[in-house]
Amino acid sequence: IKGAEAGKDLKTHWTAVCGKGNEWFADFLWETGKNRRALISLTKAADQYEIKGLLELCLSLYATFVKFCELADMDRILDPNITDGNLLPLRDELRSPNEHSDRKEGSLNNTDSNGISREEKKQGDDEKKSAVT
């Protein structure tokens, strides 16, 4: 894997982050990090059992992924469906930038994520209250 920062090799950077003498740990976490679900499970276990050093290394690996990923791949870099270290193709259900801007405009117009305005929601709530009484 090559990083965005001057084509730097991520594994070499990761080994340097772990420090001299910790190459085995760096290799273990690197191989575990290729499968994002395994990395997530390892991170949760390190947190649950309060293994501070392992938790810091897991979080450092996440930070390394994020630091060196291309901006266009930011939404895919931590995808839990990655099992071999390679990014998966962009999923269809991910929104395009135009849809994100439409959604932001809708929130400025006092609508919720379903497109229902606050006035419509309030009228519906008032109708429910009057039907109960």
Image (cartoon, grey):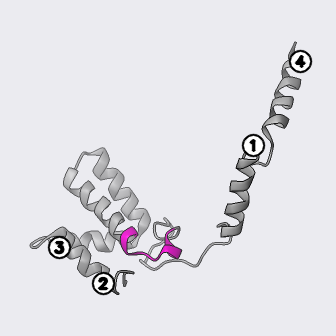
- Residue count near mark 4 (Cα–Cα under 10 Å), binned few <14, some 14–19, many ≥20: few
| Residue 68 on the magenta segment | yes
Q: In terms of sequence position, does the residue under pointer 3 or pointer 2 come before the other?
A: 2
Do the numbered discs 3 and 1 sit on residues whose CB atoms are within 8 Å? no
Residue holding disc 2:
9
- Where residue 77 appears, as percent x and y from the top left, is 46, 70
Could you tell me how far apart the alpha carbons at marks 3 and 1 are, in whole angstroms?
54 Å
Residue holding disc 1:
110
Q: In terms of sequence position, does the residue under pointer 1 or pointer 2 come before the other?
A: 2
Could you tell me how far apart the alpha carbons at marks 1 and 4 are, in whole angstroms?
24 Å
Circle 3 — which element? helix
Q: Nearer the viewer, mark 1 or mark 4?
A: 1
Q: In terms of sequence position, does the residue under pointer 4 or pointer 3 come before the other?
A: 3
Residue holding disc 4:
130
Could you tell me how far apart the alpha carbons at marks 4 and 3 are, in whole angstroms?
68 Å
Give the number of the disc on residue 24. Answer: 3
Instruction: Write the start and end of the magenta stretch as one range.
Output: 66-74
Q: Nearer the viewer, mark 3 or mark 1?
A: 1
Circle 2 — which element? loop
Label 3 amino acid?
Answer: Trp
| Residue 106 on the magenta segment | no
Residue beneath the point at 73% across and 44% down: 112
Q: In terms of sequence position, does the residue under pointer 1 or pointer 4 come before the other?
A: 1
Image quarter in which the C terminus is found: top right
- Residue count near mark 1 (Cα–Cα under 10 Å), binned few <14, some 14–19, many ≥20: few
Residue beneath the point at 85% across and 36% down: 120
Q: In terms of sequence position, does the residue under pointer 3 or pointer 1 come before the other?
A: 3
Q: Nearer the viewer, mark 1 or mark 2?
A: 1
Do the numbered discs 1 and 4 sit on residues whose CB atoms are within 8 Å? no
- Residue count near mark 3 (Cα–Cα under 10 Å), binned few <14, some 14–19, many ≥20: few
Circle 1 — which element? loop
- Where residue 38 appears, as percent x and y from the top left, is 39, 63
